[in-house]
Image: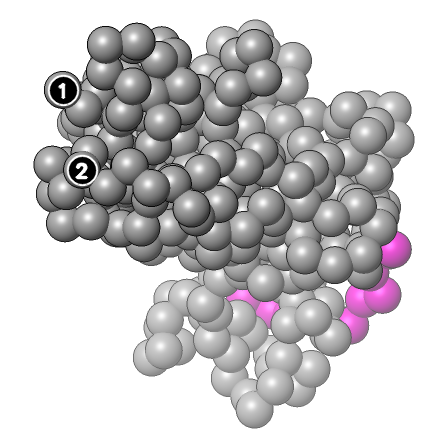
Amino acid sequence: MSLYLTKYFNASNLNDATTIYDDALLTLVSANGYYSDGVTTRYQLDGVLGGNKICPTCLSYPCTSGIGIPTDGIGRYNLKTTFGADIGAIKVLIKGVGTMPIGVQLLKDSIPIDNLFSSTSSSPSLIGQINAPITNALSFFSSSNSTSGVCKDFNFSSISLPTYTYSGSNWVTDNVNTNINMTNRRSVVQNADLEDLLIYIPKTSATDIFLTTIAVSPCGGTALTNKIEIGCPEPLPPVPMSIAETTAGDACENNVYDITLYVGYVSGATVGGDVRIDINDFIFEDANGETKLADGFYGISGANKVGGINPTYPYAFIKIENGIVIQVGTCT
């Protein structure tokens, strides 16, 4: 699966075109490489399109195979994952976002997903939603601006890289480079210690889906063998809460927890059978992670917050923004 790019050609369709361009005025000839509209696939060399090619069948692998995407090397990596009949939330984990840029795009049945991540970092500037300006496109992230050379501060807007696909035993490339736009990036000035990025993707029926994960590592990184990991669908753990309130005080006063909601752990965890909600966790209305909880304050039992219950103060509250916990507090 390739990146979805906006391109222009000098005909009503790709099959009849002679040249691919980067601009609507047809003045900037696109880089050499393969281009496809999903039906027609042609290779452009020095501004001239060749004949239509028949694409090989895209290989896919089940989530249980444990295949991850190694982004310590330099390149673009494509992985297509299947999930069978299981229903639940699919956790995608980008491990150890470091000083080198890492780009990611996720497509569910070929439809781009909004890259709305949460970080495991507890830094105040990184609490809540993490995203690039254009959320449903290839998005680049890094943890700081301390890198040197061409990667420092993302000081280049595009790069030409080979694409690697998984063969069933290793990552292989056809050695044909593709120009990749790197302008859709979250400012490195904001990105101190992003650590891990997580997102949950819903699978709501027994019908199988394809998840295409595109990872772009323009500069390499630390030697993590599976820097992007794709989990299998699992129902999210339930937790009782109050209705939404406008203040923390109102949420604390409302200790009637008669609404069941569901937690997509980012920093939290299940401890001793209790759901422990922490900063940056996702909260959903359903166990499949399809609908994020509306903004507001919610009352919860003290047993369901990070650290567990305080016998003196048995009630707690959380604040939700963009479906993510941005505050956890004890009601005193």
Residue at left 83%, top 39%? 61
**Left/right of residue 13 with respect to residue 59 in the rendered view:** left
| Colouring mode (rainbow / by chain / secondary structure / one colour) | one colour
Answer few, some or many: residues within 10 Å of disc 1's Cα (few below 14, many 20 plus, some between 14 and 19): few
Q: Which residue is mark 1?
A: 332
Q: Quadrant of the C terminus?
A: top left
Res. 253 mark: 2
Q: Secondary structure at mark 1?
A: loop
Q: Quadrant of residue 329?
A: top left
Type of residue at label 2? Glu
Res. 184 mark: none
Residue at left 73%, top 48%? 87
Q: Which residue is more in the foreground, 214 or 261?
A: 261
User: Is 246 inside the magenta-drawn segment?
Assistant: no
Q: Secondary structure at mark 2?
A: helix
Q: Position of residue 177 (x, y in %)?
A: 60, 42
User: Is 48 inside the magenta-drawn segment?
Assistant: yes
Q: Position of residue 79 (x, y in %)?
A: 71, 40
Q: Which residue is more in the foreground, 240 or 209?
A: 240
Residue at left 38%, top 12%? 308
Q: Earlier in the sequence, mark 2 or mark 1?
A: 2
Q: Position of residue 204 (x, y in %)?
A: 68, 57
Q: Magenta stretch?
A: 46-57
Answer few, some or many: residues within 10 Å of disc 2's Cα (few below 14, many 20 plus, some between 14 and 19): some
Q: Quadrant of residue 249?
A: top left
Q: Which residue is more in the foreground, 329 or 4?
A: 329
Q: Is residue 96 above or below residue 171?
A: above
Is residue 286 visible in the rendered structure shown here? Answer: yes
